[in-house]
Protein backbone atom coordinates (compact mmCIF):
# COMPACT_ATOMS: atom_id res chain seq x y z
CA UNK A 1 0.00 0.00 0.00
CA UNK A 2 1.42 3.39 -0.96
CA UNK A 3 2.29 5.75 1.87
CA UNK A 4 1.38 9.38 2.37
CA UNK A 5 2.64 11.50 -0.50
CA UNK A 6 3.32 15.21 -0.46
CA UNK A 7 4.04 17.58 -3.31
CA UNK A 8 6.16 19.44 -3.96
CA UNK A 9 9.06 18.20 -1.86
CA UNK A 10 10.92 21.51 -1.99
CA UNK A 11 9.71 25.04 -2.56
CA UNK A 12 11.32 28.46 -2.52
CA UNK A 13 9.16 31.57 -2.24
CA UNK A 14 9.67 35.22 -1.37
CA UNK A 15 8.05 37.23 1.38
CA UNK A 16 4.50 38.28 0.63
CA UNK A 17 3.79 35.46 -1.78
CA UNK A 18 1.38 32.65 -1.12
CA UNK A 19 1.91 28.92 -1.40
CA UNK A 20 -0.20 25.79 -1.71
CA UNK A 21 1.02 22.40 -0.56
CA UNK A 22 -0.64 19.11 -1.40
CA UNK A 23 -1.05 15.85 0.50
CA UNK A 24 -2.46 12.51 -0.63
CA UNK A 25 -3.25 10.21 2.30
CA UNK A 26 -2.88 6.46 2.46
CA UNK A 27 -5.70 4.78 0.59
CA UNK A 28 -8.66 4.30 2.90
CA UNK A 29 -7.52 6.97 5.35
CA UNK A 30 -10.07 9.72 5.79
CA UNK A 31 -8.30 11.96 8.27
CA UNK A 32 -5.46 14.28 7.28
CA UNK A 33 -3.48 16.40 9.72
CA UNK A 34 -0.84 19.02 9.02
CA UNK A 35 2.18 19.85 11.14
CA UNK A 36 4.96 22.44 10.92
CA UNK A 37 8.49 21.55 11.97
CA UNK A 38 11.02 24.28 12.70
CA UNK A 39 14.32 24.12 14.60
CA UNK A 40 13.05 26.54 17.24
CA UNK A 41 9.50 25.30 17.80
CA UNK A 42 9.77 21.64 16.93
CA UNK A 43 6.76 19.80 15.51
CA UNK A 44 3.57 21.78 15.92
CA UNK A 45 0.02 20.84 14.98
CA UNK A 46 -1.62 23.07 12.36
CA UNK A 47 -5.03 21.52 11.65
CA UNK A 48 -6.89 18.32 10.92
CA UNK A 49 -9.49 17.46 8.31
CA UNK A 50 -11.94 14.60 8.25
CA UNK A 51 -14.58 14.09 5.59
CA UNK A 52 -13.86 17.51 4.10
CA UNK A 53 -14.40 19.29 7.43
CA UNK A 54 -11.81 20.96 9.60
CA UNK A 55 -12.19 19.31 13.00
CA UNK A 56 -9.28 20.70 14.92
CA UNK A 57 -6.99 23.70 14.62
CA UNK A 58 -3.70 24.56 16.27
CA UNK A 59 -2.46 27.94 17.38
CA UNK A 60 -1.50 29.44 14.04
CA UNK A 61 -2.60 32.72 12.41
CA UNK A 62 -5.37 32.86 9.84
CA UNK A 63 -2.78 33.06 7.05
CA UNK A 64 -2.60 29.29 7.38
CA UNK A 65 -5.60 27.53 5.91
CA UNK A 66 -6.46 24.20 4.40
CA UNK A 67 -9.10 22.11 2.80
CA UNK A 68 -9.89 18.51 2.06
CA UNK A 69 -11.47 17.07 -1.05
CA UNK A 70 -13.99 14.26 -1.40
CA UNK A 71 -11.18 11.81 -2.25
CA UNK A 72 -9.51 12.73 1.10
CA UNK A 73 -6.64 14.57 -0.57
CA UNK A 74 -5.79 17.75 1.28
CA UNK A 75 -4.20 21.07 0.48
CA UNK A 76 -2.65 23.60 2.78
CA UNK A 77 -2.32 27.26 1.89
CA UNK A 78 -0.16 29.94 3.44
CA UNK A 79 -0.80 33.51 2.35
CA UNK A 80 1.42 36.56 2.74
CA UNK A 81 4.49 34.49 3.48
CA UNK A 82 6.88 35.61 6.20
CA UNK A 83 10.50 34.59 6.74
CA UNK A 84 9.43 32.67 9.83
CA UNK A 85 7.23 30.41 7.73
CA UNK A 86 10.32 28.64 6.47
CA UNK A 87 9.87 25.11 7.74
CA UNK A 88 9.24 21.48 6.94
CA UNK A 89 5.49 20.98 6.51
CA UNK A 90 4.35 17.49 7.28
CA UNK A 91 1.10 15.81 6.47
CA UNK A 92 -0.16 12.76 8.35
CA UNK A 93 -3.10 10.48 7.70
CA UNK A 94 -5.01 7.88 9.63
CA UNK A 95 -8.26 5.98 9.38
CA UNK A 96 -11.04 7.60 11.32
CA UNK A 97 -11.14 4.82 13.87
CA UNK A 98 -7.45 4.40 14.64
CA UNK A 99 -5.08 6.47 16.69
CA UNK A 100 -1.82 6.09 14.80
CA UNK A 101 -0.88 8.82 12.35
CA UNK A 102 1.37 8.00 9.42
CA UNK A 103 3.47 10.83 8.06
CA UNK A 104 4.51 11.81 4.58
CA UNK A 105 8.04 12.93 3.68
CA UNK A 106 7.18 16.61 4.04
CA UNK A 107 7.52 19.73 1.94
CA UNK A 108 10.53 21.90 2.71
CA UNK A 109 9.44 25.53 2.29
CA UNK A 110 12.06 28.26 2.19
CA UNK A 111 10.92 31.89 2.30
CA UNK A 112 13.48 34.45 1.12
CA UNK B 1 4.92 26.05 28.56
CA UNK B 2 6.10 22.71 27.24
CA UNK B 3 3.60 19.97 27.89
CA UNK B 4 5.91 17.26 26.61
CA UNK B 5 9.61 17.26 27.39
CA UNK B 6 12.49 15.19 26.14
CA UNK B 7 15.27 16.46 28.36
CA UNK B 8 18.12 14.70 26.58
CA UNK B 9 18.84 16.28 23.20
CA UNK B 10 21.28 13.50 22.37
CA UNK B 11 22.26 9.99 23.39
CA UNK B 12 25.14 7.77 22.27
CA UNK B 13 25.06 4.01 22.74
CA UNK B 14 27.31 1.15 21.70
CA UNK B 15 25.93 -1.31 19.18
CA UNK B 16 24.27 -4.27 20.90
CA UNK B 17 23.58 -2.38 24.13
CA UNK B 18 20.28 -0.98 25.34
CA UNK B 19 19.09 2.50 24.35
CA UNK B 20 16.71 4.20 26.73
CA UNK B 21 14.93 7.34 25.60
CA UNK B 22 12.82 9.31 28.04
CA UNK B 23 9.85 11.62 27.84
CA UNK B 24 7.97 13.53 30.54
CA UNK B 25 4.55 15.10 30.24
CA UNK B 26 2.52 17.41 32.42
CA UNK B 27 -1.15 16.80 31.61
CA UNK B 28 -2.86 13.78 33.15
CA UNK B 29 -5.55 14.03 30.45
CA UNK B 30 -3.16 12.66 27.84
CA UNK B 31 -4.42 9.18 27.09
CA UNK B 32 -2.39 7.87 24.16
CA UNK B 33 1.36 7.95 23.71
CA UNK B 34 3.49 7.28 20.65
CA UNK B 35 7.11 7.15 19.60
CA UNK B 36 8.28 8.19 16.17
CA UNK B 37 11.69 7.94 14.53
CA UNK B 38 12.84 10.59 12.09
CA UNK B 39 15.70 10.72 9.61
CA UNK B 40 16.78 14.06 8.11
CA UNK B 41 14.62 15.29 5.24
CA UNK B 42 12.01 12.57 5.89
CA UNK B 43 8.73 12.48 7.73
CA UNK B 44 8.48 10.79 11.14
CA UNK B 45 8.05 7.01 11.04
CA UNK B 46 5.72 5.43 13.58
CA UNK B 47 7.48 2.99 15.93
CA UNK B 48 5.24 1.98 18.80
CA UNK B 49 2.38 3.28 20.91
CA UNK B 50 0.69 2.68 24.24
CA UNK B 51 -2.64 3.69 25.69
CA UNK B 52 -3.04 4.97 29.21
CA UNK B 53 -4.72 1.75 30.35
CA UNK B 54 -1.45 -0.14 29.92
CA UNK B 55 2.00 0.26 31.41
CA UNK B 56 4.04 -1.68 28.86
CA UNK B 57 3.91 -2.53 25.19
CA UNK B 58 6.45 -4.54 23.19
CA UNK B 59 7.13 -4.83 19.50
CA UNK B 60 10.28 -6.71 18.59
CA UNK B 61 13.31 -4.79 19.79
CA UNK B 62 11.17 -1.86 20.94
CA UNK B 63 9.41 -1.62 24.30
CA UNK B 64 7.52 1.38 25.60
CA UNK B 65 6.91 1.85 29.31
CA UNK B 66 4.35 4.21 30.79
CA UNK B 67 4.43 5.41 34.39
CA UNK B 68 1.24 7.41 34.81
CA UNK B 69 1.87 8.45 38.38
CA UNK B 70 5.21 9.95 37.39
CA UNK B 71 3.87 11.17 34.02
CA UNK B 72 6.85 9.50 32.40
CA UNK B 73 7.24 7.56 29.18
CA UNK B 74 10.30 5.66 28.02
CA UNK B 75 11.36 3.75 24.93
CA UNK B 76 13.81 0.86 25.23
CA UNK B 77 15.63 -0.45 22.18
CA UNK B 78 17.38 -3.78 22.67
CA UNK B 79 19.76 -4.56 21.08
CA UNK B 80 20.62 -1.21 19.54
CA UNK B 81 21.79 -1.25 15.92
CA UNK B 82 23.61 1.43 13.87
CA UNK B 83 20.49 1.77 11.68
CA UNK B 84 18.61 2.96 14.76
CA UNK B 85 20.57 6.22 14.66
CA UNK B 86 17.95 8.91 14.16
CA UNK B 87 15.95 11.53 16.04
CA UNK B 88 13.28 10.01 18.27
CA UNK B 89 10.16 11.97 19.15
CA UNK B 90 7.61 11.10 21.75
CA UNK B 91 4.08 12.29 21.01
CA UNK B 92 0.99 12.45 23.16
CA UNK B 93 -2.71 12.77 22.50
CA UNK B 94 -5.15 14.64 24.65
CA UNK B 95 -8.27 12.69 25.49
CA UNK B 96 -10.98 13.75 23.02
CA UNK B 97 -8.52 15.23 20.50
CA UNK B 98 -8.17 12.09 18.46
CA UNK B 99 -5.81 13.33 15.82
CA UNK B 100 -3.97 16.25 17.39
CA UNK B 101 -0.59 15.12 18.61
CA UNK B 102 1.75 17.14 20.80
CA UNK B 103 5.39 16.29 20.23
CA UNK B 104 8.47 16.47 22.39
CA UNK B 105 11.56 18.22 21.09
CA UNK B 106 13.28 15.01 20.11
CA UNK B 107 16.40 13.05 21.12
CA UNK B 108 19.18 12.34 18.65
CA UNK B 109 20.23 8.72 19.13
CA UNK B 110 23.61 7.67 17.79
CA UNK B 111 24.46 3.97 17.87
CA UNK B 112 28.18 3.44 17.57
CA UNK B 113 29.46 0.34 15.75
Image: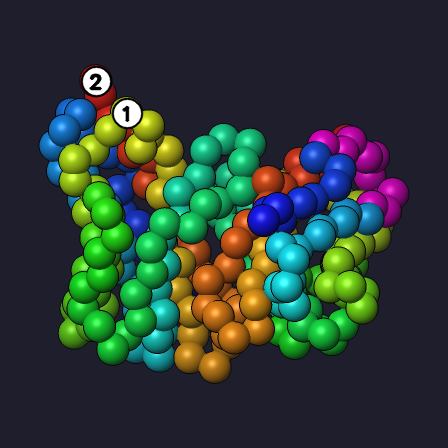
Q: Nearer the viewer, residue B55 or A59?
A: B55
Residue in the foreground of this view, choosing between B68 and B16: B16
Q: Which residue is rendered at x = 83% and y = 35% of the image? A: A14
Residue A76 vs residue A4, the one in the foreground: A4
Residue A82, placed above or below residue B104: above
Secondary structure category for the residue under label 2: loop
Q: Is residue B22 visible?
A: no
Determine the residue positioned at 53% across, 69% down: B99
In the image, residue B39 lies in the stretch drawn in magenta: no
Q: Which range is magenta?
A: A10-19
Taking the image as shown, residue B34 lies to the left or right of residue A73, namely left
Q: Residue at x 62, y 64 (%)?
A: A29
Task: Return the x and y of residue B98 as percentages of the image width and height.
Answer: 50, 74
Q: Do the residues labelled 2 and 1 touch (CB within 8 Å)?
A: yes
Identify residue for label 1: B82
Q: Locate the C terminus of chain A by quadrant.
A: top right
Spatial CA distance of label 2 from label 1 is 6 Å
Disc 2 target residue: B113
Amino acid sequence: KAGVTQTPRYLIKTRGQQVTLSCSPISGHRSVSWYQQTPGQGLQFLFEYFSETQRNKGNFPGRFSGRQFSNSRSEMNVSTLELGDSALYLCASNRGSTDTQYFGPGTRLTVL
Amino acid sequence: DQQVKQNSPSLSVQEGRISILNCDYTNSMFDYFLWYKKYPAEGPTFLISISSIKDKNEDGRFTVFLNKSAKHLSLHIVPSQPGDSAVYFCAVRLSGSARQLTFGSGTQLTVLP
